Image: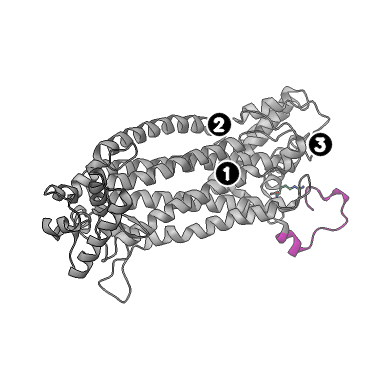
Amino acid sequence: MALWGGRFEVGVATSTQEFGASLPVDKHLYREDIAGSKAHAAMLACQGIISDADALAIRDGLDAIKEDIEAGAFTFSVDDEDIHMAIESELTRRIGEAGKRLHTGRSRNDQVATDTRLAAKHLAGQLMEATLKLGRVLVETAESHSGAILPGYTHLQHAQPVLLAHHLLAYSWMFKRDFDRQKNAFDAADACPLGAAALAGTSYPLDRRMTAFELGFTGVIPNSLDAVSDRDFLLDLQYACSVCAMHLSRLAEEIVLWSSSEFGFITLSDAYSTGSSIMPQKKNPDFAELIRGKTGRVYGNLMQLLVTMKGLPLAYNKDLQEDKEGMLDSTHTLLQCLDVMAGMISTATFNEDVMRRACDRGYLAATDVADYLAKRGMPFREAHAVVGHLVLVCEKRGCDLVDLTSEDFKQASNLFGDDIAGALDIESIVAARTTEGGTSPKAVAQQLKLCRTAIVAAEAMLELVHTHDAMNR
Ligand code: ARG
């Protein structure tokens, strides 16, 4: 009979027992459950609700159970519906009477909400660490290729030349925002539901602030109904995961393109590529593709939780049990993706000469030629048309703008002088884009400084998060 079996005449059917159980998923939350129970028992004793001797027996019993779980010496029984029941019934088997007093002034409803929040905080911290690591790799890669130039694209067509460092730093900003979103998710989980009990609070003189503090929470949730039924913090975490997965997927897509023979901009390390079972020549960017592919399941988990939460009346409903699998899956998936991406980038070879040669195709200088005319008095719109015509001439001759003679230019407009060659030089084009946030080496060096500062700030933030979290591990 289950721990709640008092008012039942027969036990649940085997099929419903299995259907209703969450143990296969929430057993991963054993650390959080034990930390929550230890804090609760200590508070009960402080408030004179249970004896100090009982609280000590509970604490030692829980520590021993934790050790056994970690040593693989704990057998979970199918009779236990969830991790809360599994640990409580084992505790009672081990220490007797005192174990039965642990659940005083508590319900599994505030217990599971507490465990889940602790787990969400821990996972958010891990994601922050992995995201920061990838950010660092991108910044370091940008720094070590500071002179490389490649075509910048719009619509996947050659547009204007940009520094490789500039391109890579664009991703580092995405991951900086992901880090912030992960921290937001950490903060959203950072309030303690314990003491809400089943839904309405309890008549025992609990000290909610004590348990909250003990568990590293910043405060308590002010409404008991909200405390047991809110899962917004998981939606925040899932959303943070989804956006980060999207950024990884975009970067992965560029890696797939760049490593193709058409582009040839990068060569992946063998350690981050696979071969084909039939085509001996193949070297495939499987892991970049897989990162792109995993995005789907992360989005799926966000959508699943949104739909699960929709229309739930207050307060606890068993539907809420469906909240943890997606959290574990999305965070685990993303941690792997972040790690693989960091390794893939840091071991890749960036073929600077191939990138530079690609800049000689696709009329990358066209905007600058138009600017040349506009700076000599021609309205930009007219200049645009003149250069458009020159591009057409090139198309017909099968050449690029650099191959045109100064006669060709002068024929198109008498504003062109012999110095037009300067406007066609890729390095000068890049160097001229000095706007704040632009692609000139000077502006990119400024940007790198900002990135470095952001990384230092993120490191400090992460340390704070880890200190909080260490309390419950
Ligand atoms: N296994 C449950 C869950 O994950 C724990 C809470 C159960 N509460 C209850 N009243 N049935 O949500």
User: Image check: 460 left or right of 194?
Assistant: left
Nearest the viewer among 373 and 445 is 373
Q: Is residue 243 above or below residue 273?
A: above
Local secondary structure at mark 3: loop
Residue 166 at least partly seen: yes
Distance (Cα) linking label 2 and label 3: 28 Å
Judge depth for marks 1 and 3 and give the one in front. Answer: 3
Give the mark, 1 or 2, whose residue is nearer the N terminus: 1
Give the mark, 1 or 3, whose residue is nearer the N terminus: 1
User: Which residue type does callout 2 highlight?
Assistant: Met
Nearest the viewer among 458 and 415 is 415
Q: Quadrant of the C terminus?
A: top right
Residue 472 at x, y = what percent?
Answer: 57, 34
Residue 471 marker? 2
Q: Which residues are magenta?
A: 1-19
Residue 145 at least partly seen: no
Judge depth for marks 2 and 3 and give the one in front. Answer: 3
Distance (Cα) linking label 1 and label 3: 35 Å
User: Which residue type does callout 3 highlight?
Assistant: Ala
Residue at numbered disc 1: 68
Q: Is residue 368 above or below residue 96?
A: below
Residue 281 at x, y = what percent?
Answer: 25, 71
User: Image check: 334 left or right of 399?
Assistant: right
Residue at numbered disc 3: 200
Nearest the viewer among 386 and 320 is 386
- Asked which quadrant contains residue 40, the reply is top right
